[in-house]
Image (cartoon, rainbow, N blue to C red):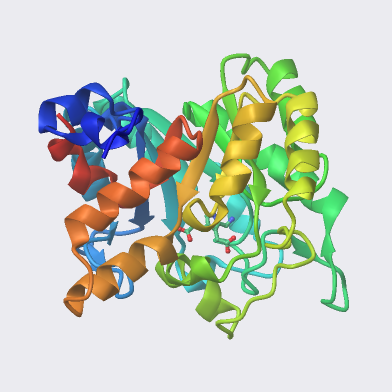
Amino acid sequence: MYLSRRPRRLRKSTSIQAMTQETWLKKEDLIQPLFVIDGNSPAEAVNSMPGVYRFNINELVRTAVEVHELGIPAIALFPSINAHLKNAVGTEATNPETLVIRAIKAIKAEVPELSIIADVALDPYTTHGHDGLLSEDGTEVLNDETVEVLEEMALLLADAGVDWVAPSDMMDGRIGVIREALETNGFKHTCILAYSAKFASAYYGPFRDAVGSSSAAGTHHLNKNTYQMNPANRREAMTEVALDIEEGADAIMVKPAGPYLDVIRDVRENTTLPVSAYQVSGEYAQIHAASQQGWLDLEKCRYESLLSIKRAGADMILSYFSQAIAPSLD
Ligand code: PBG
C-alpha cells in the first residue's frame, strides 16, 4: 500500500514517542491537599480515601516537609473541626486561634518556602455543613451576610501567613470583597485562588467524610445547588470566571477536574491567568476502589487522569495523588 501519511511512524520507538509527546506532567504542576485535626491523637485514616489521613499539627508539619522535599510547590489545607466547636453560624471560622491558623503558622515556621493554600468557606465549621449562613427558616444560604464572614476569615488567614486564600464557597461578589479587604489591610501579596467554576458534584462525597461536613448535616446528600453550579452548564462557568477575574482573582479554579475537562479547556482559552483544576476526592476514590478490585491499574490510571487534566489546560493541579506520584515524575 502507498500511504503519503503514516502517523504511526511517530509512534515507532520510545525515543520518537518521547520526542513527539505534547504534554508532560511535572511535580511542579501539583498541589497536595492535606487534612488537619486538633489534639495529639495519631493520624486518622479517611476510609473512603485510601492513603489519605487527617494529621495532627505535628504530623502535618512533618508531611509538609516531605511534600516540599519531593519538589511539590504547594499544599492546600483543610481542617476537620471537632463537632463541639461547630454551630449554625460557624463561629469557629473567625476564631484567630482556630486549627487552620495554627497549622499555617506551624508549617511556615518549618518550611516557609512551601506555598500554602487555605479554603475560605464555612462548611468545616457549620453544624449543617453548608458553606454559608442560613436564613432563619433554614431554607436559604444567605449571600451577602456570608461574604462578610468570608472577608473576616480571609484577613485572618492572610495575617497567619497563608500564600493563597481560596474562596470555595461560590457566593456572589466574594472575590471583590476579599480583594479589597486584602489591599486595604496591608496584604498586597496574598494571592486569591478563586474556585470560580465549582460544580454541585456528587464526587465531593469522600471529602465530606474527611472533614465531617456530611455527617454533621445528618445526610449524605447535602444539597448545595443554590450556590454551586449545575453540572450541565458550560457557558455559565465562563460567566463565573469573568466575574472573578474582574473582581481581582489571581488564578482560576475548575472543580471537579476529570469530568469537567471541557470547562478547563474553555477557561484556558478565555483567560491569560493561571488555571487550576481540582481532582476531587471522588475522582481519587474511584481509581482506588477499582484498583482494589483488580479492575484498574492504580499507577497507570492516576498518571493518565492527571496528564489528561494537564492536557485540557490546567497549570496547577490539586490532587490527593500528588505526593504518591511525584517521585515517578523525575
Ligand atoms: C467546601 C469544599 C469542598 C471541597 C473542597 N472545599 C466540598 C464541598 O463543596 O462540599 C471538595 C474537595 C474534594 O471533594 O476533594 N468548601
Quadrant of the rendered image containing residue 266: top right
Q: Position of residue 187 (x, y in %)?
A: 62, 18
Q: Position of residue 224 (x, y in %)?
A: 70, 68
Quadrant of the rendered image containing residue 165: top right
Instruction: Judge by depth and name the residue closer to the eye, 16 or 42.
Output: 16
Q: Could you tell me which residue is drawn at 50 percent across and 51 percent down?
A: 257
Q: Position of residue 209 (x, y in %)?
A: 43, 72
Q: Position of residue 127 (x, y in %)?
A: 62, 73
The answer to whether residue 14 is left or right of residue 124 is: left
Residue 186 position (above or below residue 30): above
Quadrant of the rendered image containing residue 137: bottom right
Q: Could you tell me which residue is drawn at 35 percent across and 59 percent down?
A: 37
Q: Quadrant of the C terminus?
A: top left
The answer to whether residue 126 is left or right of residue 299 is: right
Instruction: Judge by depth and name the residue closer to the eye, 238 or 69.
Output: 238
Query: Which residue in the rendered view is the most extreme toward the bottom?
Result: 218
Query: Which residue in the rendered view is the most extreme toward the front?
Result: 1
The answer to whether residue 135 is left or right of residue 163 is: right
Instruction: Judge by depth and name the residue closer to the eye, 302 or 202.
Output: 302
Instruction: Judge by depth and name the residue closer to the eye, 25 or 155.
Output: 25
Whether residue 174 is visible to the viewer of this picture, yes or no, is yes
The answer to whether residue 106 is left or right of residue 252 is: left
Whether residue 32 is visible to the viewer of this picture, yes or no, is no
Tag count in the figure? Answer: 0
Residue 263 position (above or below residue 20): below
Q: Quadrant of the N terminus?
A: top left
